[in-house]
Image (tube, grey):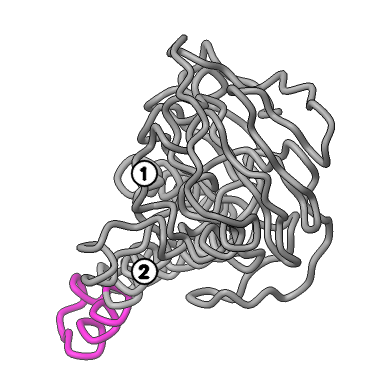
Amino acid sequence: MENKNKALKFIFWVVTTLALGVIFYKFFGDLEQPMEWKILTVFITFSICAFLYRVLRKKSTEDQLTRWTDEAIEWSDTGVSAVSLAFVIMAFVLQAFKIPSGSMIPTLLVGDHLFVNKFIYGPQVPFTLKRIKKFKEVQRYDVVVFLCPPAGLSESDRRDGIKKDFIKRCIGLPGDTIEIKDKALYINGQKADDAHGTFNQPAIYPRVALFKTKEEYQAQWEKGEFAHVQTELIRDNFGPVKVPEKHFFVLGDNRDGSYDSRFWGPLPEEYLKGRAWLLYWPLNRIKLIR
């Protein structure tokens, strides 16, 4: 009987961990909002439940209630262990997200669910932008998830302290020169083999001289000032700009419908959260993300 109870508790522990992952991505998984505080809330809730069970155990006098609370405590401890494991995994290793917009069409569609590898670029200390250790450098064309820089947020979001996660493709590495001419991508002066970029609007907006010098253009772009410029003025003809050190240039695969580095500027390295790894829902679209 004792071995049977241990086996049941182990199964409960595994199932609870998996179920929590499902709950997290179902209710908290949109890229619009970070998940850490919500995960921590669930963890604290389970801990409080375990504590309350222990209080009941100490105050109970009837044998039947004592047996019930003893069993409840054991199962709640198993549940807390599962929540702890889920929290560690989602904070440092793997996290589920749901795609809220069409900026990465056709690679990722609205409503797609995917896992993000948070370990590969170095796990972050929860609730900070500090990394414990970097295991791999960002590669060109990686699909990355990151905390949106302040310039990419609306004025009301910045005022209210709202943070959002974005997903884009890394196009430019530190030191690269990026330019877009009539929708064609150029990297370091050479036309890129832009296999991922798609365009759903045939119209090409002409280049407009926004600033008198390249230096002024670069400086205003780095500050994120292009977020206040009309989309038509920079969407199809942009740059050239040089990606600063410890920054990246990211674009959505849906180039005509993506709010990205063209507008809010370079992405700081510390804002990276991880690399998109596996699209697992819907089932007919399961694939590794490239």
Q: Is residue 187 left or right of residue 145?
A: right
Q: Is residue 183 left or right of residue 172?
A: left
Residue topped by disc 2: 37
The image shows residue 121 at horizontal and vertical percentages of 74, 58
Tell me whether the residue at label 2 lies in contact with that at label 1, contact meaning CB atoms closer than 8 angstroms: no
Q: Is residue 100 above or below residue 204?
A: below
Depth check: give the residue in front, 273 or 141: 141
The image shows residue 74 at horizontal and vertical percentages of 41, 69
The amino acid marked with disc number 2 is Trp
Residue topped by disc 1: 30
- Mark 2 or 1, nearer chain start: 1
Q: Secondary structure at mark 2?
A: helix
The image shows residue 101 at horizontal and vertical percentages of 37, 32
Which range of residues does the magenta coloring cover?
Answer: 49-66
Could one spot residue 9 in this view of the protein? no
Residue 99: quarter of image = top left
Please tell me which residue is depicted at 64% across the width and 55% down the height of the picture: 214
Q: Is residue 41 left or right of residue 25?
A: left
Is 63 covered by the magenta stretch? yes
Magenta span: predominant SS is helix
Please tell me which residue is depicted at 24% across the width and 63% down the height of the picture: 155
Please tell me which residue is depicted at 79% across the width and 22% down the height of the picture: 193
Q: CA distance from mark 2 to mark 1?
A: 14 Å
Depth check: give the residue in front, 184 or 81: 184
Task: Looking at this view, name the residue that lies furthest to the front.
Answer: 212
Q: Is residue 220 above or below residue 252?
A: below
Q: Secondary structure at mark 1?
A: loop
Per the rendering, the mark at residue 182 is none
